[in-house]
Amino acid sequence: MKSSIFVLSALLPVLSSCSCGDTARSVASTLTEKTVETAKGAAAGVTSGIEEGRKGTVGLDGAQVLTSWSDMKGKASVEILSVKGDETGTVEVTLGVSNSTDQPIRLTGLTGQSVMLLDKDGYISRLERGPLELTVPQHAKDKAALVFKGKAADFVTLRLLGGELAMPR
């Protein structure tokens, strides 16, 4: 509501010079469309800039930041340690992450956009709960619990940061 009032107040000087209601409507529609388009582009650019800026960097604690499956090659390995389903339709996948480097690693971007389960037909269940990032010390392993909706038996693949792991049977 506040944004609508802001846009309308910004348009009033322009619209007051229009002689016809239809012209005013058209001008307001076009200006609002372009304003929203610009704001969406700026927001997407900020998000992309943050992700790209973090790739391949080292955190303040010395951890190598890994944001994709390909970033993990030669540095980290991932395995599914267990899958538990319950009667409420919740699936918990325990993931094991192994760091084979001489420095800590940090997997980031563990969200519903990059972590999901797929069934045999390719339908997904996005991550409901889990860590947003996981830091694993050098030459060590760590576990992460990932929670999804659905029945454990329905899922065949875990997709993680662009890579895929077969679900154990």
Image (cartoon, rainbow, N blue to C red):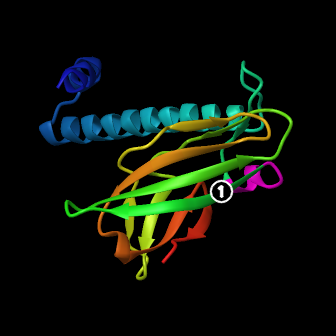
Q: Nearer the viewer, residue 30 or 108?
A: 108
**Residue located farthest toward the bottom when viewing the structure as drawn:** 121
Quadrant location, the N terminus: top left
Looking at the picture, how far across and down is residue 62, in whole percent? 77, 24
Q: Nearer the viewer, residue 73 or 49?
A: 73
Q: Quadrant of residue 51?
A: top right
Looking at the picture, how far across and down is residue 101, in whole percent? 84, 41
Tell whether 3 sits left or right of 125. left
Q: Quadrant of residue 18?
A: top left
Residue 71 lies in the magenta-colored region: yes
Please say if 6 is above or below 127: above
Q: Residue at x 51, y 32 (%)?
A: 42
**Secondary structure found at label 1:** strand
Three-letter amino acid code at disc 1?
A: Val
Looking at the picture, how far across and down is residue 168, in whole percent? 52, 73
Q: Residue at x 81, y 46 (%)?
A: 100
Q: Quadrant of residue 152?
A: bottom left
Q: Residue at x 43, y 82 (%)?
A: 120
Q: Residue at x 29, y 65 (%)?
A: 150
The region drawn magenta spans 69-75
Q: Which residue is mark 1?
A: 78
Tell whether 20 sits left or right of 77. left
